[in-house]
Amino acid sequence: MNRLTCGLLLAMMPLLAQAATTEEWQTWQADTPAFQSRVEQSRWLPEAETRVHADGELLYIPTQSLAWQWVTPQPRIVTLDMTGQFVELTPDVPELPVVPLSETDDGLPEERQVIRLLFQLLQGDLAALRERYHLLLDGEREDWQLILLPRDRSEGALKKVAVEGGRFIESLQFVSAQDNELSLTLSDPQPPVEARGAQLLAESLTTDTIDTTQGDGSPDRSASADPAASDD
């Protein structure tokens, strides 16, 4: 090995040593404080030349819950707690004459699957993520990208998920086998007005819940119309 090669290797060593690991990323995410932010979601379906857009607010409380309050196109509130249960409330307003996204064959994940994945990402839950994805991390604390490659390589399976962030997660992009895309953007993160906001929201919704299911989508037999109801 000549001196030039040795010199190049020595010069590169500090750069190699600075490469972040997924374990370091996990630590960064574990430090994410409670916050609320604007959230926008869009699905692009090339074959149908259609874009479905929604926007609202998101509230995250570490180790407790994640709440979405959609303003458009249909006002709704969806919460997910640490037990894996969802609570959904849709106000008593006329529904839009559109086909629900869950009924479209676009190869993209349904809303609750997106919510659950985001919750795992915010917590830095490597065990849950590695169970379903191969992880490729690039960047540093204030500017990073995490690529999730699904272990399921069957026909029609999701192609990849690209997550970008810094101090907070900023975006997620899902790409299906048909090249349909779902983009989720989080912006303007702020400390929550009420530290227990998501938990209180979930509790207050139990008397008005219209859709209460567990993580597998089946009805929660323990739920009722009484103030004790509470779920990809």
Image (cartoon, helix red, strand yellow):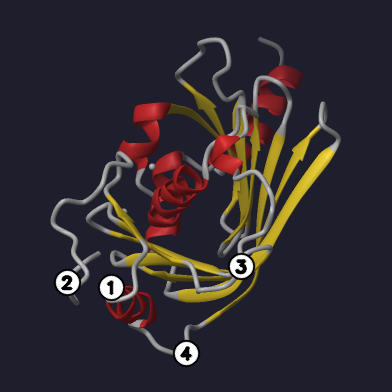
Dot in front, 3 or 1:
3
Label 2 sits on a secondary structure element that is loop
Of mark 3 and mark 1, the one earlier in the sequence is 3
Residue beneath the point at 61% across and 62% down = 95
Q: CA distance from mark 2 to mark 4?
A: 25 Å
Label 4 sits on a secondary structure element that is loop
Residue beneath the point at 50% across and 83% down = 191
Whole-percent x, y for residue 73 in the image: 68, 63
Label 1 sits on a secondary structure element that is loop
Residue that carries the numbered disc 3 in the rendered image: 94
Residue 128 occupies which quadrant of the picture? Answer: top left
Residue that carries the numbered disc 4 in the rendered image: 193
Residue that carries the numbered disc 1 in the rendered image: 206
Q: Give, as a three-letter code, the residue at label 4.
A: Val
Of mark 2 and mark 4, the one earlier in the sequence is 4
Q: Give, as a three-letter code, the residue at label 3.
A: Pro
Q: CA distance from mark 2 to mark 3?
A: 27 Å
Q: CA distance from mark 3 to mark 4?
A: 30 Å
Dot in front, 1 or 4:
1
Residue 8 occupies which quadrant of the picture? Answer: top right
Of mark 1 and mark 4, the one earlier in the sequence is 4
Whole-percent x, y for residue 45 in the image: 77, 34
Q: Quadrant of the N terminus?
A: top right
Residue that carries the numbered disc 2 in the rendered image: 228
Between 55 and 12, which is closer to the camera in this rendering?
A: 55
Label 3 sits on a secondary structure element that is loop
Between 96 and 193, which is closer to the camera in this rendering?
A: 96
Residue 227 occupies which quadrant of the picture? Answer: bottom left
**Disc 4 crowd, CA 10 A, few/some/many (<14, 14-19, 20+):** few
